Structure formats: structure tokens, C-alpha cells
Amino acid sequence: MNKLIFVSGGVCSSLGKGVAASSLGALLEGRGLNVRMVKCDPYINVDAGTMSPYQHGEVYVTDDGAETDLDLGNYARFTSGALSRTNSITTGQVYEAVIRKEREGRYLGRCVQVIPHITDEIKHRIRSAAQEDPDTDVVIVEIGGTVGDIESVPFLEAARQLIHEAGKINALSVHLTLIPEVAGGELKTKPTQHSVKAMQEQGIQPDILICRAPVMLDEGNRRKIALFTNVDPEAVFTSYNIETTIYAIPLIFFEQKLDQVVLKKMGVESRHANLEPWYTMMEKFRTRRGNVRIGIVGKYMELHDAYQSVYEALFHGGLETGVAVELVKIDSGKLEEPDGFERILGPEAPEGSIDGVLVPGGFGQRGTTGMVKAASWARTHRVPYLGICLGMQIMVIDWGRNVLGWEDADSTEFNPQTKHPVISLLDEQVDVKNYGGTMRLGKSPSLVEPGTRLFACYQQETICERHRHRYEFANTYRTAMTESGLRISAYTLDRGLVEAVEWPDHPWGVGVQFHPEFKSKPTAASALFRDFITAVRDRKYPKGEGNNDE
């Protein structure tokens, strides 16, 4: 039987439940166990694909094209277990499946209820994720939301049933709570006591508590919490504030022996812990020299989570190249204001000293003119540039407008009446009305042209990266673009679609239609982000100068 670990949260949201679950997964992998991560999201949307980034942050895409919650990005960065659509369970998916079965008469006329029909569907999906890989040892199930939320009740009830059915040695409850600090520096345990009480009212007694606190809990507070929550004192852990990086959390939990307690409670014999990749990564973090400022020009800048994987991949690239990466968030819409460009990117502006430009993915016309201005600035000022998805399309639009002189060059997504639609829909997308899950999604192979920067990056002719887009480089304009100097550096295997472009005679200007950020890890940076940061570093710190390694 697979071991099950349910990770829930209490008191308030945004405590770091996903990072805590991912860190536990990393520790168990370090003990030689095969781990699969599952996220249960209480929202009624079928998936995160049609949500605004302001509502739910970025959409993380799996190899099989599932549009999922950003926590799956944490799972991918911390653990090595496969991720697919079975790893993401939403209320929308569950009710959709149950209602479909009811319409098909599969419940034989019975009254369909939350218990047992909804909870049975949740349990079935959790078991399916566990069984997808026969070598899986442990399944860590993160239950979204906060205990006490009405939306989370069916998932907690399903967890209660599975814990009861599997037995305590095969199923654990890990509960993350908040320990606030009040005036005078006193830590208050009462919110944690109430949170555990709320879990007990759901029929679940937490086996392990992870307390989110500003500082490490002392022995007195740990024993007090254990006494009032019916949890063993050795099973009360602290997730305290750190000034380094979230990737230090697995090692912080390791020092507190979280993995040892989990193994003991699950009846798994203690194994040697191999956390060398995490120690190596932290050594790279501590030995970085110098810093580079990367201007991220996007339209969802107010919410950090909207570009979470991009920001993390930039950090990974900095680890790999030995420099600290400073994120300079630039709202592309503000570049369109009368004096916005000079104020933000002009020679006298603070952001004018940025060392590299990245334009990430996005949808809709808002802010795209500002993105084109930023791309043109990077091209003419010979500043390293990385365009991802929309960012590549912006490069093509800039080339059409400012090199070929087609002032109205645009995407039909932004201007359906343009005379020069250099970016357009595929024929099969023209009549699509249902926007959920209908884009080009998931893993897709690309053919890389030898002699290009992209080939120098990947060192192979065929690569596989993940896509999430509906519009493409218009093949009608291939000849005009390439004859004027724009380099096409990757195609689909049949050469039917353009996958990447590069600026000629430029230190480093690359745009890709896919999303390399989804496969980047702190222990194995994306090759494309690594080379982008390398180009930025070498431009700022030429060999023999500055702080970088010679």
C-alpha cells in the first residue's frame, strides 16, 4: 500500500503550505523514497486555465497539457516525481465527473450526495494519482484553502475516510498553522490550538504540526502546543522566517528531524539521507559574486505569483552562473504613458541601468505596445533579451514595425484588421469559442537549427519544452523576416511552425514560443535561463573585470 500524507493549513492563507509540502517531498526523496505530489483545489473552476493571473497567480502547465495551480510548480522545483493532470484535483473536476455519471444513470437512480458520491470521487482521484506510477512509495496530498472554509470540507472528509481506511501507519495528517508575534515579541499559540480544534471537528487528529513563526519555537512553546493539541512534542516543528531562499527550507526541516519523525510514524525503516544536491545548491547561493538587474516587462506585475516560475527560473540561472539576480518589475502599460518610457527606461531613470530584459507570456492587447518599445530598446541598445511565448511574438512585431517599416505590424489577437498580421491564429483555432484547454498545450518537440544561440544552449537538435498559446508566427512572413536578417532558430518537427527567433549581430536576443521556466529547478537550472543570465553577466562584468569568476 502507498503511504499517504495529507497536508492541510489553518488560521490563514499564504503560510507556505505548498512549499512545506514540497520540502517534505524533497526530504523523503533524499531518503530514497519515490514521492508523488497531489494538489486538491477547492475552487469550482475545472482548472486554472481560464483564471486571471490576478485571481490565482500563474498557470503551471504539465507535460500532458494540464493547466494547473502554481503549487504544482513548487512540486516540480523541489521534487522529481512525474506531474500530470492526475496530480491536480479541483472541485470543478469532481462535480463535473459526478454529474456526468448521474446523467448517464450510473448511480442507478439513487440520490446523489456529497457523502458518499463526491467524497468517493475525490478518493478515487487520489488513488489514481497514487497508482499511476507503480513504484510510488508515498503520496503527499496538499489540501488547498484553510480549515474552516466551507469549500474545503469535502476534501477534508475524503482525507478523514482515507486515513481511517488505511490506518494511522499508512496515512498521516500534517497541519500547518500560524504562530503570530504580538507587541513585546511574545509568541501566541492560541490560533494554532483553535486550528487543530477545527481539524478535530472534521474528524482528523493531526499527527504532525508545522508552525509558521517569525523565529524558531523554544522547547517550552513546543511542549505547550503539544499539550493543547494532542500532538507528540517531537512532532511539533517550526517553519521560521528566513532571509536566504525558500530552497533552504528542506534543510531547515532536516535539521529539526521532520523526515525522521515521518518515517517513524509511517513504520518505514530509517534510511541514509542524501541531501547533497541541496547542500551544493546552498553553497552556490552563498558564494555568488556580483549582481545583475533583469527588467521583467509584463502586464501582471502587481501580483508576484503571476510570473512565479519565471522569477524562480531567473534565480536558478543566477545560481548556475554565480551572480545574484535582482528583479526589476516593469509594468508594460506604464511604458505607454506620455513620459513613461523616458521615466522608466530612459538614461536618467533608475531602471535605465537594467542589464537584461525579459518579456514573459500573457494574453490580450493591454500593455503590448509598451512591450514592443522595451524589445526595440533592448535590440537597439544591445541589451540581452529573452522573450517567452508572447515575448517572442513581441520580437516579431517589433521587427516588422521597426526594421521592415510596417507600422501596423501586429498580432490578430490585438488588431484583427492589421494589414501585416505577423502573428495570427492557426486555421483550426479560428472558430474556437470554448477557451478552456483548447490552446496548444503541454510538451511538444522542436527542431533546433545548428549554429544558433538556441543550439549552443541546448547542445542538441531536438528538444522538448511545454507550450501554452493559441497564436503563432505567421508563415506568410517567413521569407520577408529572414531575408531582412531575423533568424529562425527552431521549428516544429515538420517545419510547419516557427518555435524560436533570434536577433542577428546582437549580444544575446532570443525569443521562444515555449515556456522553459516550467522545467527549471534550483538544483538544475533551465539551460535557456542559464545562458541568458550568462550573457547578462558577461556584458556587465567582462572577463577580468567586476565581481564574476574569471
Image (cartoon, grey):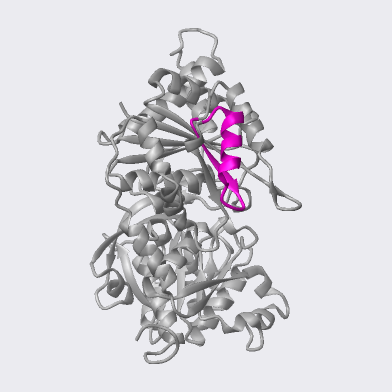
Answer left or right for 221 relative to 291. Answer: right
Answer left or right for 95 relative to 279. Answer: right
Q: Which quarter of the rendered picture does the C terminus lie within?
A: bottom left
Residue 208: percent from left, percent from top = 49, 35
Which residue is farthest front? 220
In this rendering, the answer to whether 88 lies above or below 361 is above
Which residue is farthest top? 109
Residue in front for this viewpoint, 119 or 226: 226
Residue 296: percent from left, percent from top = 55, 70
Task: Tell me if residue 227 is in the magenta stretch.
Answer: yes
Residue 161: percent from left, percent from top = 47, 20
Q: Which quarter of the rendered picture does the N terminus lie within?
A: top left
| Residue 425 visible, this angle | yes
Task: Tell me if residue 366 is in the magenta stretch.
Answer: no
Total number of numbered labels?
Answer: 0
Residue 179: percent from left, percent from top = 64, 44
For the point 55% across and 9% down, which residue is it?
A: 111
Residue in front for this viewpoint, 529 or 12: 12
For the point 42% across and 65% down, which residue is it?
A: 316
Residue in front for this viewpoint, 250 or 67: 250
Answer left or right for 59 relative to 450. Answer: right
Please state the extent of the stretch shown in magenta in the rendering.
207-231
| Residue 363 visible, this angle | no
For the point 49% across and 17% down, which residue is it?
A: 117
Which residue is farthest right? 183
In this rendering, the answer to whether 448 lies above or below 25 is below
Residue in front for this viewpoint, 373 or 182: 182
Q: Quadrant of residue 225?
A: top right
